[in-house]
Image (spheres, grey):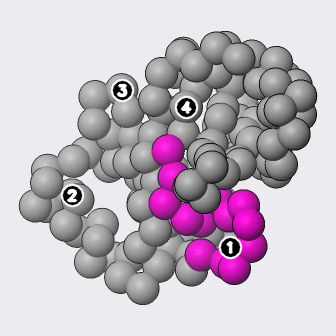
Amino acid sequence: MKITRVLHASVNAAEVLDATAAFYRDFLGLSACVRPDIPGVPGHWFAVGDVEVHLVGRPAAAVPIDPSRHHVCFGVADLDDATTALEAARVDYIRGEQRHPGRVVRQVFFTDPAGNTVELQEDSGE
């Protein structure tokens, strides 16, 4: 598996989404960026250079792998190669996808040994 870069960090702000968005926008001065419609998951996205910060407005669930939790997302050169590596290492993961204008972003989520959620996306270079 070849990690190419950090794509985003995701922060759960379920109880105070609008206040947290105002903090990142107004106090930290981050620029809002386009966020696709993700059914059942309100949120806001911000850009910091070529990395994004995603605010998630859905409470985290009591499941082992939950994309709503705080997590880091890494780009990978080949998502199929990455899932093959996860399977070979017997790491449980779940698949997801987001529909962006003109493209579909495929992703997988799993946890590290400390229980932190990690996301991988095939790096489109965008």
Going by the numbered disc 2, the residue's amino acid type is: Arg
Of badges 4 and 3, nearer the viewer stands 4
Counting residues from the start of the chain, the first of labels 4 and 2 encountered is 2
Going by the numbered disc 3, the residue's amino acid type is: Asp
Residue drawn at (23%, 59%), measured in percent from left and top?
24
Question: How many other residues sit within 10 Å of disc 2, few (<14), some (14-19) or many (≥20)?
Answer: some
User: Mark 4 and mark 1 in contact (Cβ < 8 Å)?
Assistant: no
Question: Distance from label 3 to label 1 (Cα)?
Answer: 26 Å
Question: Helix or strand or loop: what does disc 4 sit on?
Answer: strand
Counting residues from the start of the chain, the first of labels 4 and 3 encountered is 3
Place of residue 71 in the rendered image (x, y in percent of width and height, measured from the top left): 51, 52
Residue 41 visible, this angle: yes
Label at residue 40 = 1
Query: Compared with residue 119, is residue 18 higher up or lower down, i.e. above or below?
Result: below
- Residue matched to label 2: 25
- Residue matched to label 4: 74
In this image, 6 relative to 117: left or right? left
